[in-house]
Image: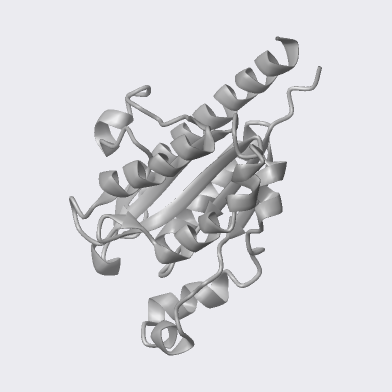
Amino acid sequence: MSDSVNVAVIYYSSTGTNTVVAKEIADTAERAGAQVRLRRVTELAPQAAIDSNPRWAANAKATADIEVASPEDTVWADAIVFGTPTRYGNVTAQLKQFIDTLGGLWAEGRLADKVYSGFTSSATLHGGQESTLLALYTTIHHFGGIIVSPGYTDPSKFTDGNPYGTSHVDAQGEKPVDDTTLKAARVQAERVVRFTRALKSGLVTA
């Protein structure tokens, strides 16, 4: 029996914070033995808006070689880790638009019984991180997915403080992703791979 696990990290990032976290989660999952697809969702903002913000334009250029997510990536995956900045305490339009393309797969039951987890960021402290992840997880309940959040399962979680998923406050670009956030990402990725492997093995042997 194979213990291989497929993990898709599907995210949106405008100015790069969530790109850094997505790459850390993807790299950690791969080191934990998973097959990984790192995918960005389609940008919906007009080019003029992107060009008006140097960090946004730089991230768009730096991530141009990362493949754009497709519904097939969710079919392939045993576990899906979604990433999104918070927008008014909710999921970004870009990630939501991708999720909305999955209706056919949802209707066929092909999104059920997979592991899901999420990560986020905001410009300010208490800027909607928890509500964004809870909103994301509401969708997962409709999928029939299995949410694997980090909880307070590692001593480091009492430092980063978010049991719902990795999150970072970038203070309008003044605070780049730090060791605390990267550690949270590693804890989350390892937990996702571990429980996905256990679940997959249990379903095979049941």
Quarter holding residue 110? top right
In percent of width and height, residue 97 lies at: 50, 63
Image point 74% across, 11% down: which residue?
A: 205
- Residue 70 lies left or right of residue 90; in this view the side is right
Q: Nearer the viewer, residue 43 or 181?
A: 43
- Residue 68 lies left or right of residue 96; in this view the side is right
Image point 26% across, 55% down: which residue?
A: 89
Q: Nearer the viewer, residue 178 or 164?
A: 164
| Residue projecting furthest to the bottom | 48
Quadrant location of the C terminus in the rendered image: top right
> Does residue 182 appear in this view?
no
In the depicted structure, whether residue 66 falls above or below residue 132: below
Image point 68% across, 17% down: which residue?
A: 203
Image point 33% across, 30% down: which residue?
A: 156
In percent of width and height, residue 190 lies at: 53, 30
Q: How many marks?
A: 0
| Residue projecting furthest to the top | 206
